Image (spheres, rainbow, N blue to C red):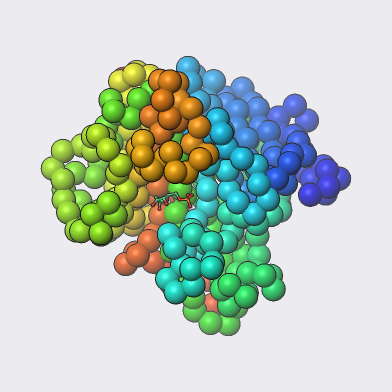
Amino acid sequence: MPTTRFARFALPGELEFNPGPGTLGSLHIRNELASATICLQGAQLTAWRPRSAGNPVIWTSPSAQATAGKSLRGGVPVCWPWFGPHATQSTLPAHGFVRGLPWEVCASGRAADGATEVTLAIGDSEQTRAAWPHAFLLELQVRVGATLEMSLVTRNTGLGTFSVSEALHTYFAIGDIAAARVHGLEEVEFLDKTRAGDRRVEHQPIAFDGEIDRVYCNTSGDCTIEDPVLGRRIRISKTDSRSTVVWNPWDEKSRKMGDLGPGRQGEGGWRDMVCVESGNVGSNEVSVLPGALHRMAVRYSVEAL
Ligand code: TA6
């Protein structure tokens, strides 16, 4: 994206565009409250750190590779219009196509409380229609401040109803996965992808002693990640999201992935991250009528333990 096309959205000293390899360039945001980075490829936020936080809150792999067409390992990949592998065509990218395509910046501004707001968008094209035969406009509205707020807005600009599965596939930075706990999903039924999709329920906060890959459906509740190593709690609130996915690949799977990189603990980067993803997947997929829109939103905040 040529810098000139972006220039009209720049906010000097607050929101600047840096051309970059592979990721099609990135937006760098810095204000009194926080800093953040968003790659134009996939509108993928790859960093967010409130000034009050001793450590970044969003994790990106130290071995992330900036490759055109492939999202970076970490940050907040946007999964849309399907989640996971395509239902029938294995040649299509997992988690949908928008995370590997260039998005446009379409709005930016400074909020009264000092937060920085920016909106990125992508619409249908010959390429997208070949994979998914619908007209759409998809926007990601991001608000960078002491909290991080993101809204994924799906507009049906066609003549027929369509259904989407979606998720903000967020990688959170933690001190050590073995000490972390995820609260808020107790008693909620989940599909356990490490056990061939078995339906299960747990009665305690999620603890990690191996690979976890769970799709919790019919849950609109907030979650918290308790991190005793970094001495903080990350709160995850969401609106119009009925599914929550929790994932950590652990050691063996991450070795096969190649882009999870070394971690602070001297082992794999898998120790330093956990995914808690807000979405509408599987039975929670969303139908959007012609001319209508659907908005799913998240809000992340951090507090000392
Ligand atoms: O959200 C969990 C998951 O579906 C895992 O099964 C794993 O595939 C992960 O997403 C990462 O997917 P990616 O395509 O980004 O490597």
Residue at the location (48% across, 58% down)?
95
Vertical relation: 180 (above or below) 198: above
As drawn, is 279 to the left or to the right of 119? left
Considering every residue shown, the one lying at the far right of the view is 4
Residue at the location (13% across, 42% down)?
203
Vertical relation: 200 (above or below) 158: above
Q: Position of residue 234 (x, y in %)?
A: 38, 31
In the depicted view, which residue is nearer to us: 222 or 255?
255
Q: Position of residue 281 (x, y in %)?
A: 38, 61
Residue at the location (20% across, 51% down)?
188
Q: How many marks?
A: 0
As drawn, is 159 to the left or to the right of 22? left
In the depicted view, which residue is nearer to us: 253 or 278?
253
Instruction: Identify the image quadrant of residue 280.
Output: bottom left
Quarter of the rendering occupied by the C terminus: top left
Q: Position of residue 260 (x, y in %)?
A: 49, 36
Vertical relation: 205 (above or below) 239: above
In the depicted view, which residue is nearer to us: 13 or 214?
214
Residue at the location (40% across, 54% down)?
279
Q: Position of residue 27 (x, y in %)?
A: 69, 38
